[in-house]
Amino acid sequence: MKILANILEALVAVEHLGIMILEMFFWDHPVGRKIFGMTPELSSASAVLAMNQGLYNGFLAAGLTWGLVSGRREVKIFFLVCVVAAGIMGGLSAKTSILVTQALPAFIGLILVYLTPSEK
């Protein structure tokens, strides 16, 4: 179960790294506009906010990676809870598919980490 938990946590980290890159560097670009379904006017007007949002996603990816590298269960749990919370907020306020694409994988990972016995 520990291996499965680590794989899922790594996938969530990679997902948030990808989101960071999209939001920080490709928001106001044809690729970002296509992925997020925006007009050039909307992407231009919200680019600064997206960069800030992307930075937060980068922090989530960094924290998840820290948990994986350090093996510290409490770090893994903390950052997975943060992703679940952010996914729920995004799903309720921006796009409901965020509940499935971000919150659900993190929630499953959280359950797996929680069920994995501590090594101490």
Image (tube, grey):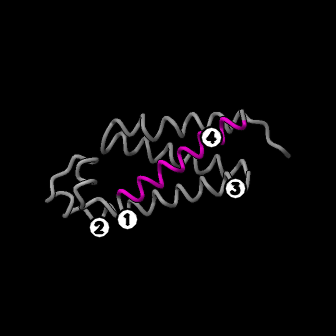
**Which tag, 2 or 3, sits closer to the chain's start?**
2
Disc 2 to disc 3: CB gap under 8 Å: no
Question: Around disc 4, counting alpha carbons within 10 Å, would you say few (fewer than 14), some (14 to 19), or many (20 or more)?
Answer: some
Farthest front residue in view: 31
Q: State the separation of the CA atoms marked 3 and 1.
A: 26 Å
Q: State the separation of the CA atoms marked 4 and 3.
A: 12 Å
Q: How many marks?
A: 4
Q: State the separation of the CA atoms marked 1 and 4.
A: 28 Å
Q: Give the labeled residue for mark 2.
A: 48
Q: State the separation of the CA atoms marked 2 and 3.
A: 32 Å
Q: Secondary structure at mark 1?
A: helix
Q: Residue placed at 83% from the left, 44% from the top?
A: 119
Q: Say if 113 sits above or below 79 in the image.
A: above
Q: Secondary structure at mark 2?
A: helix
The circle drawn on residue 7 is: 4
**Which tag, 3 or 1, sits closer to the chain's start?**
1
